[in-house]
Image (tube, coloured by chain):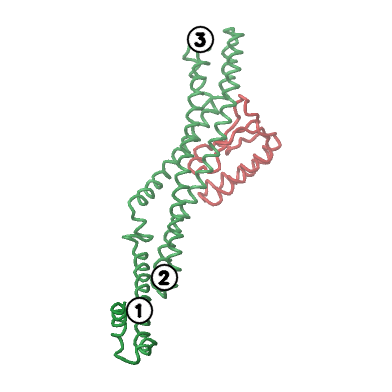
């Protein structure tokens, strides 16, 4: 599954990775609901770090679209809130 | 996904999809230009901040030297004043250093964005030529929308990244402009030491005062030697003190 981190590029993730990430995604969602900037920042950083760690960068010249798009690390809570769907940033694949 | 739908819309409105390919390619090149300009703009701002840091650090060094000089002359009050001004300057330098780091970060991000976009634009160009060469109207829509989907997403992302960098840089440029004005107006010279550098002029005054004192002291000693020293002995004790010095060369002149 191809994911884009805004401002960074595209990353290929396996479905197993996706399930792992759903946990972090939930934490992020909760942080936004509670409006806690600190928890939000940490959760976003955590999510992006895990995506980078587990995923494989797509070749630069690939013209494939991404399945979903993740915010950049400096994104504000407002920006991320606007990007959130019903299932958080990462759709539930199971 | 927002980007994808936009690309599809653009496709619908054009009769020959091949034209859309060329049009999009033009747009991609324009965006690439824009990103490169963005990199250059950020680099300019970064250099400007570097220069400002340098200037402020020079002022800070000067104040440090002044405070040492003042302390050397036993003027703790003046030394304290110089150090106080220096610490004010230091917080400004710290702020600028933080900005510098941010600008470096933006510069790096944009440089990478330009590289990514360049790679995708190149790939798109190749794809575009292939599609054109093997064009059949039936296939074209799918092939073209496939080629579009990835590049338009990248363009959307890069476009936003450039915008973010521009916003950040503009904000910093405003602050850098204020520091430049401050430097140019000489107000900072005032702060650090001009008008015409009050700390320096005080130090100069003390230095010249002590210079004068020193000279006076030397003169006094010379005169003192004249009154109580060896000359009167040569004269055989005519002994009217200070006047001797004036009298003596007179006599030598007459003798010659």
Which quadrant of the figure contains the N terminus of chain B? top right
Residue B43 numbered mark, or none: none
On the image, the x and y values in percent for residue B136 come to 59, 7
Tell me: B181 left or right of B93.
left
| Disc 1: which residue | B219
Report the front residue among B94 and B216.
Answer: B216
> What is the display colour for chain A?
red
* Quadrant in the picture for residue B48: top left
| Disc 3 and disc 1 on one polypeptide chain | yes
Q: Of circles 1 and 2, which is in front?
A: 1
Mark 1 or mark 3, which is nearer the start of the sequence? 3
| Residue B28, above or below B224 | above
- Residue farthest along the front direction in this orientation: B256
Q: Secondary structure at mark 3?
A: loop
On the image, the x and y values in percent for residue A13 come to 67, 34
| Residue B162, above or below B231 | above
| Disc 2: which residue | B70
Residue at image point 31% right, 88% down: B241
Q: Which chain is green?
A: B
- Residue farthest along the right direction in this orientation: A16
Q: Secondary structure at mark 1?
A: helix
Crowd rating for badge 3 (residues with CA inside 10 Å; few <14, some 14–19, many 20+): few
Residue at image point 64% right, 40% down: A22
Tell me: B244 left or right of A11.
left
Report the front residue among B17 and B42.
Answer: B42
Question: Mark 2 and mark 3: span between their CA atoms?
Answer: 82 Å
Mark 3 or mark 2, which is nearer the start of the sequence? 3
| Disc 3: which residue | B16
Report the front residue among B242 and B234.
Answer: B234
| Residue A35, above or below B159 | below
Which quadrant of the figure contains the C terminus of chain B? bottom left
């Amino acid at each position: 599954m191809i994911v884009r981190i805004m401002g960074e590029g595209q990353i290929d993730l396996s479905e197993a990775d996706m399930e792992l990430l759903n946990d972090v995604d939930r934490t992020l969602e909760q942080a936004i609901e509670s409006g806690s900037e600190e928890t939000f920042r940490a959760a976003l950083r955590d999510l992006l770090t895990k995506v980078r760690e587990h995923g494989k960068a797509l070749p630069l010249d690939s013209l494939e679209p991404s399945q979903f798009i993740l915010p950049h690390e400096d994104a504000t809570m407002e920006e991320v809130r606007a990007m959130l769907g019903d299932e958080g940033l990462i759709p539930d694949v199971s | 996904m927002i980007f994808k739908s936009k690309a599809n819309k653009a496709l619908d409105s054009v009769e020959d999809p091949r034209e859309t390919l060329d049009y999009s390619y033009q747009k991609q090149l324009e965006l690439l230009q824009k990103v490169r300009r963005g990199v250059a703009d950020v680099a300019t701002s970064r250099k400007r901040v570097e220069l400002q840091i340098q200037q402020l650090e020079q002022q800070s060094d000067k104040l440090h030297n002044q405070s040492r000089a003042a302390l050397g002359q036993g003027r703790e009050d003046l030394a304290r004043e110089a150090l106080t001004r220096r610490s004010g300057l230091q917080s400004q330098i710290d702020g600028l250093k933080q900005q510098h780091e941010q600008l470096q970060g933006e510069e790096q991000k944009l440089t990478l964005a330009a590289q990514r976009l360049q790679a995708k634009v190149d790939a798109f160009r190749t794809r575009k030529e292939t599609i054109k060469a093997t064009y059949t109207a039936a296939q074209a829509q799918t092939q073209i929308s496939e080629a579009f989907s990835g590049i338009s997403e990248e363009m959307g992302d890069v476009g936003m990244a450039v915008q973010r960098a521009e916003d950040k840089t503009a904000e910093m440029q405003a602050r850098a402009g204020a520091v430049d004005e401050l430097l140019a107006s000489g107000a900072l010279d005032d702060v650090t030491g001009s008008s015409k550098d009050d700390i320096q002029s005080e130090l100069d005054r003390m230095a010249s005062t002590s210079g004068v004192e020193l000279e006076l002291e030397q003169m006094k000693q010379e005169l003192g030697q004249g009154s109580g020293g060896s000359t009167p002995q040569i004269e055989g004790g005519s002994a009217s003190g200070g006047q001797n010095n004036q009298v003596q060369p007179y006599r030598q002149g007459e003798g010659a």
